[in-house]
Amino acid sequence: MKRLNIITGHYGSGKTEFAINLAISAKKCYNRSVIADLDIVNPYFRTNDAAQMLKKHGVELIASDYASTNVDIPSLPAAAASAFDIPDRFVVLDVGGDDDGACVLGRYQPKIMQEPYEMFLVINTKRPLTATAKDILNLKEQIEYASRLSVTGLVNNTNLGYEASVDDLLEGQKIVEEVAAASGLPILYVTGKKEILDQLPEYISYPKLSLDLNMNLPFMA
């Protein structure tokens, strides 16, 4: 696992769920793990919503003072720059959706380029604008242009939320493999709830990350 990890993707791809679970899983390898909420686009579904869960697992959270409030101000947390300064700390940057959200990475690009990094493109093929390989490749290019950074790997997080199934994930896998072949990028993770991952056939041999769902939709109290 690289120390510096950037999570990008389309709105509703499950970026934040992936970011949270990656930061928690990294505690097995790193003494310290931190997640920085850099989403200046969507004020409603934020890493900060899982603050208690992160604290329980010993993961540090850096978030704007306005995160998860009814104040919609596109501000970055003042402490975000400090996430880069401790060499033995695993860092996850949870970025806003699409190229609009990726623009924020330009502010930190000089620091990011000082060391090897992983930049994940989280893909949910059940979202309207990432339903085909062509759409996903276009999104990748837009994010790279806006951030001035390169995507280094793909994540298949195809799901329909609480209605997700193994068939959804397998359908998405075919499309993500098309993207991998066209872009030359590796598939770094296949993700989903544990009961879904357990149903995957043996030929899906990519690394798997089981997701504990921490983000509650407004209608799911």
Image (cartoon, rainbow, N blue to C red):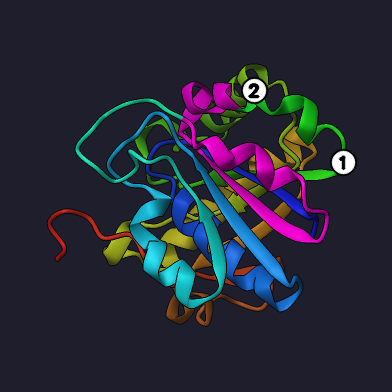
- Tell me if residue 66 can be seen: yes
Q: Which residues are magenta?
A: 76-104
- Check the image and report above or below for 142 versus 208: above
SS for callout 2:
helix
- Check the image and report above or below for 167 versus 47: below
Query: Is 134 or 12 nearer to us in this picture?
Result: 12
The label on residue 107 is 2
Q: Which residue is mark 1?
A: 115
Residue 56 in the figure: left or right of residue 206: left
First in sequence: mark 1 or mark 2?
Answer: 2
Task: Where is residue 172? Give x, y as percent.
Answer: 50, 52
Task: Where is residue 217? Give x, y as percent.
Answer: 22, 55
Query: Is 31 or 9 nearer to us in this picture?
Result: 31
The residue depicted at 78 percent of the width and 32 percent of the height is 111
Residue type (three-letter) at the residue carrying disc 2: Arg
The residue depicted at 70 percent of the width and 53 percent of the height is 187
SS for callout 1:
loop
The residue depicted at 59 percent of the width and 20 percent of the height is 142
